[in-house]
Every structure is written in structure tokens, then in C-alpha cells.
Amino acid sequence: MPEVRYLEARSVERARLIVLRGFAEKLVGLLWARRLEEAPCVLIDRCRSVHTIGMAFDLDICFIDRHMNAVRVARGVRPGRVLSARGAVCVVERPAADGPWVERGERVRISA
């Protein structure tokens, strides 16, 4: 059973997250999802760099620091990219979508 958490922020509705912790889980990330409908939002723990190499769709990505502030936010990240953020301790990814998303500098909460 995957570990589940919830992302809460001023600018977005509460979002369900699947937690990725182990090396293999982090490496694969959302690569297994070939269709947008299959892809959940994920929380990649202890992470400050991600790639979209091999992805079948664009991603919205939020890097979070130890104070739970969004230090870098990227929307519509195309496949084949590598992103990182100094000071990030975790990353939230979701399939790219219209509508609200976490904003840079915004404080977030990740709860059980």
C-alpha cells in the first residue's frame, strides 16, 4: 500500500499525494504512467532535483524547502528536462493542468 499524504496551500485545493521514498521509486517517479488519467500527484521526499526524461506528458513541479516554502515552481515542464532548486528538501509533481497551482514563496502544508 503506498503512503498517502495531502498537500494544502492557499492557492490550491487539498491534493492527495503518493509518497515516493526509495531510490527506485524516486528514479521511476511518474514514468510508469503512460496516460494522464493514470498519473497521481506525487511527493518525492529528500529531493532537490528531478527529471522529465521519458515522460509521456508535461508536469507541474513545486520544490519545497525545510521551512515548507515553495522555493521554485515550474508549470508545464516538457519531457526531457532536468530541474533543481537549491535548498529544496522535497518535490511535489502532478500532471500539468490548467487552474491553480502552488506559487513561488507560498507556504505549504503536507499532512497525513
Image (cartoon, grey):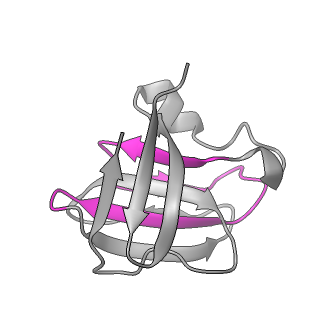
Question: Horizontal and vertical percent for residue 51?
Answer: 54, 54
Figure check: 87 above or below 17: below
Q: Residue at x 17, y 56 (%)?
A: 66
**Image position of 33 (left or right of 104):** right
Q: Residue at x 30, y 77 (%)?
A: 106
Question: Horizontal and vertical percent for residue 39?
Answer: 71, 47
Q: Residue at x 33, y 46 (%)?
A: 111
Figure check: 65 above or below 90: below
* Residue farthest along the top direction in this orientation: 1
For the C terminus, give its image quadrant: top left
Q: In front: 19, or 32? A: 19
Q: In front: 80, or 70? A: 70
Figure check: 4 above or below 9: above
**Image position of 82 (left or right of 46):** right
Q: Residue at x 29, y 72 (%)?
A: 71
Instruction: Report the span colored magenta.
Output: 40-67
Assess whether residue 52 is covered by the magenta stretch. Answer: yes
**Image position of 19 (left or right of 86):** right
Q: In front: 85, or 96? A: 96
